[in-house]
Image (cartoon, rainbow, N blue to C red):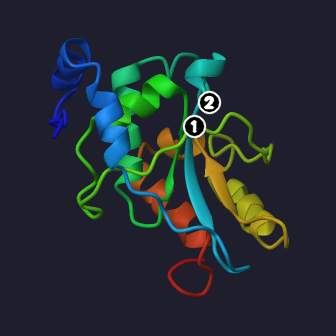
Amino acid sequence: MTPLAPSLSALVRLRAERPEAVAEAAARRTRRRLIRHPGDRLMIIAADHPARGALAVGDRSLAMANRFELLERLCLALSRPGVDGVLASADVLDDLLLRPPPAHRGQPQRVAPLPVRGVLLGADLAADQDAAYGKWRDALRLPTVRGLVVGRSLLYPVDGDVTLAVDTAVSLLRPGRDGP
């Protein structure tokens, strides 16, 4: 079994010394159950921004340029209950597969490359956090919307609290049960 990389330096070393470790980790990952019912929701953390050259967050033009910081923020976001997976470029997915799983899951993280996605524009937390959550809540009321795909707003919130931002977004998927 491929050892997972507990630190970023171990990750770099593992990728350099055992490139086959990515394929081994991918073969072991689990898949989430399919969305089969109208009430089922999906929470995906979007991290495809660097691959598209979209590095700015608010007034910080290179906020997402530090790959190691991005990976740490992704691991934190993926550790939150209710998060189903991540949308990212193949190299970021590879790095995530080689990281230890979030503590609450006890299994490899659920990751998948998703090249095309629908986008709800105008929901930037940097501008107005409450307004963004309101737009997401409204979108989730539409019959064809099955979840959220959110990135910068959750990984780089204005107050810096990734955990709170992710937990708030997840709570929107379950109105009346454990959130707004």
- Which residue: 54% across, 86% down? 177
* Residue position marked by numbered label 2 in the rendering: 58
Instruction: Specify the amino acid type for callout 2.
Output: Gly
Of 179 and 18, the residue lying toward us: 18
* Residue position marked by numbered label 1 in the rendering: 113
- Which residue: 38% across, 60% down? 80
Residue 126: quarter of image: top right
Instruction: Specify the amino acid type for callout 1.
Output: Pro
Q: How many marks?
A: 2
Q: Disc number at residue 177?
A: none
**Percent of width and height locating residue 155:** 48, 41
Of 54 and 117, the residue lying toward us: 117
Mark pair 2, 1: CA separation: 26 Å
Instruction: Choose the circle earlier in sequence order: 2 or 1.
Output: 2
Answer yes or no: do the residues labelled 2 and 1 have beta carbons within 8 Å?
A: no
Residue 64 sits above or below residue 39 on the image: above
